[in-house]
Amino acid sequence: MSSPNAESTAFRSALEVIRAVEPRVADAIAAELADQRESLKLIASENYASPATLLAMGNWFSDKYAEGTVGRRFYAGCQNVDTIEALAAEHARELFGAAHAYVQPHSGIDANLVAFWAVLADRVEAPALKRAQARQVNDLTEADWFALRRELGNQRMLGMSLDAGGHLTHGFRPNISGKMFDQRSYGTDPATGLIDYDKVAEAAREFKPLILVAGYSAYPRKVNFRIMREIADSVGATFMVDMAHFAGLVAGKVFTGDFDPVPHAHIVTTTTHKSLRGPRGGMVLCQPELAEQVDRGCPMVLGGPLPHVMAAKAVALAEARRPDFADYAQRIVANAQALAEGLLRRGATLVTGGTDNHLAIIDVTSYGLTGRQAEQALLDAGIVTNRNSVPQDPNGAWYTSGIRIGTPALTTRGLGTAEMDTIAELIHTVLSQTRPGANADGTPSKAKYALDAAVADKVSRQASELLTGFPLYPTVDLT
Ligand SMILES: *Cc1c(COP(=O)(O)O)cnc(C)c1O
């Protein structure tokens, strides 16, 4: 532990230095801390990184170009970058039991692109790939992509469907992966909401993907990665897991055995800022045979590495190796389950009927609302969530029918299962008191809603009272 005043002094001094140049930036930084302290944050993908992690980013590592990898740089003078990159990778390998770790990706999307190109380079005939690499991606037309896919041979991806909780980067249209791959998705069983592994196996046999992807941003259950690997092997696919959301639960040994992706997947990607609680960034873990291609991430698909962020990754990964992180990971899940049970007891409907990870999806159609109406009403009452599709969503991807809630952030603040029950009460109060609105012509609106201001105020007050007992960044006093 650093001395009690060190963190306050560090952030106060930093703000003083910034304020002397552009006071509005210093003010916005201070305001952001104040806002985060007051917000009841149930966004499943967000967290609060430690002061040490945050401070590791604000320094002269930011000034350095370090294209290439440890010991093989395109720039001179990278010995200190080598030190921190090697350290971050070592912590990642040890923490996850991975053969190889690549810590340069700037984000989760970038980590996936690195992984996709590594698999293509590994599996596809080199001449076709060289031609693809020589062309500017932006110049390729739809017909070019089609021709390219054919030229490259089997370039198919099988991943989880968006409405079942999959991610855009798993071959969907708004992301470049949707251009690179001929994509098909597997959904969940309509009756249970769970992945039906027999259906995944059937889709794999029919479609014969080059890459089978598992991983999600909105599926509230464990995934059996041993079975998924068997399916991949049965059709000769590379098995990739995107653990962006649940990396903290893997690190904290909540997901072990069949549910730990690292021993089962050929390649694993992740963000570092969600349940893992590090700086904003990404990472790739892989089997030795993919290591060389993965290390070509920069300059293949990434710009110059961010050494200051790699320094922060090394700090956060060191934190995640400590025993208290395992305790944290267990509390995340206990809290999610308490929140889910609190909601179910009050009559809410949850996708799959509960959770065994860090998140839950409330199906708000049972309250007569769309996801958009529910999200805004909750926000009016001081509860920050995000709307999310439910499987076979009747309201589409924009309005949606779900609210995603997650516990990594509030668990970092120290809230426990008793507080989760109170939060369930607050959420249920808001949702059951919110009425759907109508358009000017009298037709039902998917966006408008009415919530009594007195109810919103009362819940909002209760939410902030709840938070006062659990100060955020208690070691940081900016006054
Ligand atoms: C959040 C997320 C990503 C993208 O991460 P960014 O850092 O925002 O690029 C990728 N995959 C999954 C499954 C995610 O949940």
Image (spheres, grey):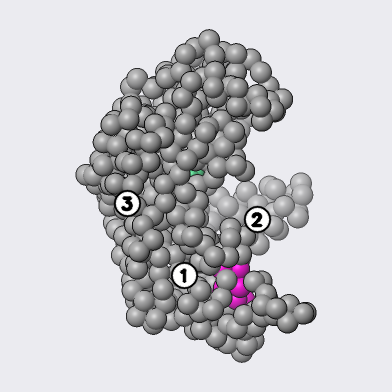
Residue at point 45%, 55% (across, down): 164
Which residue is disc 3 drawn over?
A: 196
Residue at point 57%, 37% (across, down): 178
Placement of the C terminus among the 4 image quadrants: bottom right
Residue 454 drawn at (x, y percent): 61, 89
Apparent side of residue 262 relative to residue 36 in the rendered image (left or right): left
The label on residue 363 is 1
Confirm whether residue 474 shows in the render: no
Residue 130 counted in the magenta span: no
Residue farthest along the front direction in this orientation: 206
Residue farthest along the left direction in this orientation: 257
Quadrant housing residue 140: top right
Confirm whether residue 370 shows in the render: yes
Do the numbered discs 2 and 1 sit on residues whose CB atoms are within 8 Å?
no
Q: Does the residue labelled 1 lie within 8 Å of ligand 1?
A: no
Indicate whether 283 appears above or below 125. Answer: below
The label on residue 29 is 2
Instruction: Describe the element under mark 3 as helix, strand or loop.
Output: loop
Q: In 3D space, how far apart are the residues under numbered discs 1 and 3 (Cα atoms)?
A: 20 Å
Instruction: Describe the element under mark 2 as helix, strand or loop.
Output: helix
The residue closer to the viewer here, 5 or 23, is 23
Q: How dense is the environment of label 1, judged by Cα within 10 Å: few (below 14), some, or many (20 and up)? A: many
Indicate whether 349 appears above or below 253. Answer: below
Mark 2 or mark 3: which is in front? 3
Mark 2 or mark 1: which is in front? 1
Residue at point 68%, 47% (across, down): 17
Magenta stretch in the rendered image = 371-380
